[in-house]
Each structure stands twice: as C-alpha cells, then as structure tokens.
Image: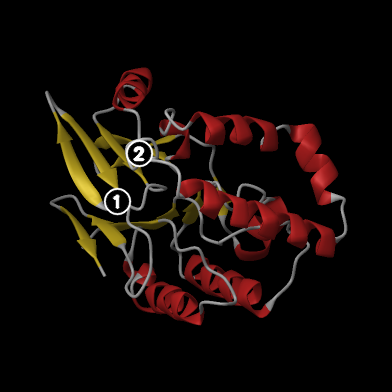
C-alpha cells in the first residue's frame, strides 16, 4: 500500500536516549515501507555545525542512510533548532534538503510543507531573532568559531528560549490565522502540513482548507501517515 510519513520536532539529544530509540525503531520498522519520509524540522534539539561528531549524530546518519539505500527518499526542512544543518550532513546520509516552503504532489493533492515557525508571526521577539540568525554572513562567522564556543552559545540560546516561553501566551506561540491563510493563497494549495507548535491536530478550515499539525516526540512518537485513501496519526 502506498504511504508517506511525516515527522517533526523529535529534538534528539544525547541526554534523551529514549527519543533516539523511538527514531531508530521508526526508521527500521516503518520507514522502509514508505514511498517517502519527510522530516519537517527540529530533528535535533540544536545543531552547531556539520563538523560536529557524536554517537547520536552517527546513529542518525546511519539510520537515514540505510532507509535511503532501500529506495525510500528522505527529505528535510530546517527547523528553528537545526537550521544550520547543511549539505555535508545531507551528503553523508543521502538526505535531501528542501527550502523553507515546499509544495509536493501528495497522491494527487498539492500540499504545502514547512516547519511552522514562520507562521507564528504574533511572536515578534522570535521573528526578530529568526531574521538575525538566518543572515548568511552571521552563519558564516558562527560556523568558523571553535566547536566548544558554538556549543556554549547554543546552550545559552536554548536556556533563554525556555525562559522566554514562560512569559508568552499559547496564542502568541501558535500560528497566525490570517498569515497562514495567505500562505494557502500564495502557494495555491488547500492542504498544509507543519510542525513547530507541538499541537498535534488536523484542522478543517472553512471553506475548504486543511491544516495538519505534527506533534512532538516524548514518551511516544508522533507520526503522520498519509495514503491515497486516508490521513492518520500513529505512535
């Protein structure tokens, strides 16, 4: 049976081996059955450069590479945590990098994919931060810092982000409805799949739009399975 899988917001890290185990299980027992696998950002809790090496990174590369070897293409859209993941990592495992917005033909239905952070336009502080860190010259400089320095910076940013979230409302950190509607119109689609907000759901938006939100991974996985006949979440 034809099927395509979508996942996001795994936030893999050395400190949470249970998440790595869930990812390995998915890649070994489900992904090989698929027509394609799409990872819509935040595969890692943070990413400081393709020159970083660790057992976790080696494991993730191996699992992706093995699935690709079996003829299943794996695609990746950058998240807000791993936007520095680059061509070297992709080449090592056969991962195909996509732009921040990508329209695919999903069994006859044009479907827009993105990580989802760009849709949260009410969070002005985050959008300002995002514009800064996505400047090519700043990324060029960051990548040339020593690994230890980059790691310290990433951890400080992560800690500040967690602290800032405590002072933000759920509404502020969710997608902006009007901006999202404009994305449907801009890309001429009726279906959108994204992650980032961690609010797994399938929203039916009148008159004929569908917004599917991928969940984050914790004690269980959050996997969206799409076939020509149905759409459903699996664990």
Disc 1 marks which residue? 199
Q: Is residue 153 above or below residue 140?
A: below
> CA gap, disc 1 to disc 2?
9 Å
Residue that lies at the very extreme toward the front in this rendered image = 167
Seen in the picture, residue 162 relative to 68 is either above or below; the reply is above
Tell me: 45 left or right of 172.
right
Residue at x 36%, y 40% (from the top left corner): 169
Residue 104 in picture, x, y percent from top left? 37, 38
Residue 79 visible? The answer is no
Q: Please give the label number shown on residue 160.
A: none
Q: Do we see residue 68 in this rendering?
A: yes
Dot 1 and dot 2 residues touching (CB under 8 Å) = yes
Marks counted in the figure total 2
Q: Nearer the viewer, residue 152 or 5?
A: 152
Give me the residue at 80% from left, 33% from top. Answer: 137
Q: Which residue is drawn at 51% across and 81% down?
A: 17
- Label 1: element kind: loop
Quadrant in which the C terminus is drawn:
bottom left
Is 33 situated above or below 170? below
In the figure, residue 224 lies in which quadrant? Answer: bottom left
Indicate the position of residue 181 as horizontal and vertical percent values: 29, 23
Q: Work out whether mark 1 precedes mark 2 in sequence or the reverse, and give the earlier one.
A: 2
- Left or right? Give the position of 86 relative to 225: right
Residue 25 position, x and y percent, is 40, 79
* Residue nearest the viewer, comparing 161 with 5: 161
* Left or right: residue 30 compared with residue 229: right
- Give the residue pinned by disc 2: 174
């Amino acid at each position: 049976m034809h099927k395509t899988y979508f996942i996001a917001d795994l936030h893999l890290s050395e400190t949470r081996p249970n998440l790595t185990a869930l990812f390995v299980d998915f890649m070994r027992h489900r992904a090989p059955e698929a027509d394609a696998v799409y990872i819509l950002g935040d595969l890692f809790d943070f990413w400081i450069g393709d020159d970083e090496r660790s057992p976790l990174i080696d494991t993730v590369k191996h699992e992706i590479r093995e699935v690709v070897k079996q003829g299943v293409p794996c695609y990746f859209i950058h998240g807000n945590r791993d936007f520095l993941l680059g061509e070297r990592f992709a080449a090592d495992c056969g991962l195909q990098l996509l732009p921040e917005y990508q329209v695919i033909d999903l069994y006859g239905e044009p479907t827009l994919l993105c990580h989802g952070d760009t849709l949260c336009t009410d969070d002005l502080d985050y959008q300002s931060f995002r514009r800064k860190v996505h400047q090519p010259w700043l990324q060029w400089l960051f990548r040339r810092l020593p690994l230890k320095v980059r790691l310290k910076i990433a951890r400080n940013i992560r800690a500040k982000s967690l602290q800032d979230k405590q002072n933000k409302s759920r509404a502020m950190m969710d997608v902006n409805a009007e901006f999202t509607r404009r994305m449907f119109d801009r890309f001429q689609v009726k279906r959108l799949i994204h992650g980032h907000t961690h609010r797994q759901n399938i929203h039916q938006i009148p008159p004929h739009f569908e917004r599917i939100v991928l969940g984050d991974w914790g004690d269980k996985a959050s996997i969206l399975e799409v076939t020509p006949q149905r759409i459903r979440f699996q664990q």
